[in-house]
Amino acid sequence: MKVKYFAWVRERIGKSEETIEPPATVRTVDDLIGWLAQRGETYAYAFETPRVIRAAIDHAHVKPDTMIAGAREIAFFPPMTGG
Amino acid sequence: MTVRIQEADFDTAREIAALSKGRTDIGAVVSFSGICRGSEGGGSIASLTLEHYPEMAEAEIMRHAETAMSRWPLLGLSVIHRVGRIHPGENIVLVVTASQHRQAAFQAAEFLMDYLKTSAPFWKREEGTAGAAWVEARSHDDAAAARWTKS
C-alpha cells in the first residue's frame, strides 16, 4: 500500500510518500503507526506521540481502530490548521 | 457550487458578483474572508506557507459543501482555499453563500468555515522573526466544529 506523510510528519520522516508491505499482524491504523515507528529514528520521532497523529484511508478521515485491509492509500498528518 | 484550491490570489468582489449575477431569487449573500495576519502571539509573521493533501482536500471541502447545501436552503456556494506562500494582508480562504434570506447564508458560511478549520487537510507553517514553525491546532476550533453536530 501507499503511505503519504504531510506537514511535520513528512518533515520528521524525511519523505512525502512510500510504498510499504506491513505484515498481516498489522491490522489497524494504530497497529500501522506502531509498526512504522519501529522503522528507524526518523519514524520514531514522527510518531512519538501517536494520539496527535491523524490518519486518512483513501482520502477519508479514519479513527485509530479502523482496519487497514483493502486500503490503497493511507496518509498520516498532524491536526489540520487550514482555513 | 464552486470549490477551488489554488496558489493564485482571488478577487472577493468578483466571486460575490459571480454568485448573484443575473439572479433575482437571491436575497442574501454572506462572504467570509480569511486573511494572513502580520503577527501572532507577539511575534511578527513574514509569510505563511500552506501545505495540503490535494485529492483529499478537494473531496473533503466538496463533502462539507454538499452537506451545507442539503442542510440549508442555499441558492449558491463558493469556497476558495489558497495554498503555497502567502504574505500578511493577503487572502487565504473565501467562503461565499447565497440564499433567499440571511439566516441560511450566515449559518452555512459559519458551518463551512468551522469544518474547513478542523477537517480539511491543510497545514500552515509560519515564517517569522523567531524562525519557522508549524501552526498548532486550537481546541476552540474543534469545539466550534462540534457544535454543528449537536441538536
Image (cartoon, rainbow, N blue to C red):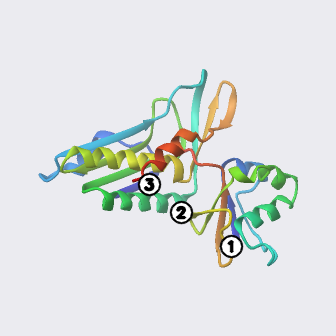
Residue B8 % position (x, y): 45, 45
The residue at which mark 3 appears reads as B149
At a point 48% along the width and 63% down the height, the residue shown is: B59
Q: Is residue B68 visible?
A: yes
Mark 3 vs 1: CB contact within 8 A:
no
Q: Quadrant of the N terminus of chain B?
A: bottom left
CA gap between label 2 and label 3 equals 25 Å
Calculate the distance from the C-alpha at mark 3 to the C-alpha at mark 1.
Answer: 27 Å
Compared to residue B88, the image places residue B137 above or below, namely: below
Q: Nearer the viewer, mark 3 or mark 1?
A: 3
Dots 1 and 2 on the same chain: no
| Mark 3 neighbour density, 10 Å: few (under 14) some (14–19) many (20 or more) | few
In the figure, is residue A51 to the left or right of B90? Answer: right
- Residue where numbered disc 1 is placed: A68
Find the distance from the CA under tag 1 to the CA under tag 2. Answer: 19 Å
What's the amino acid at mark 3?
Thr
Q: Amino acid at mark 1?
A: Ile
Picture quarter containing residue A55?
bottom right
The label number, if any, that marks residue B138 in the structure image: none
Q: Secondary structure at mark 3?
A: loop
**Residue B1 visible to the viewer:** no
Q: Please, is residue A35 above or below residue A27 in the view? A: above
Q: Residue at x 43, y 46 (%)?
A: B113
Residue pictured at 58% horizontal, 28% vertical: B46
What secondary structure is marked by label 1? Answer: loop
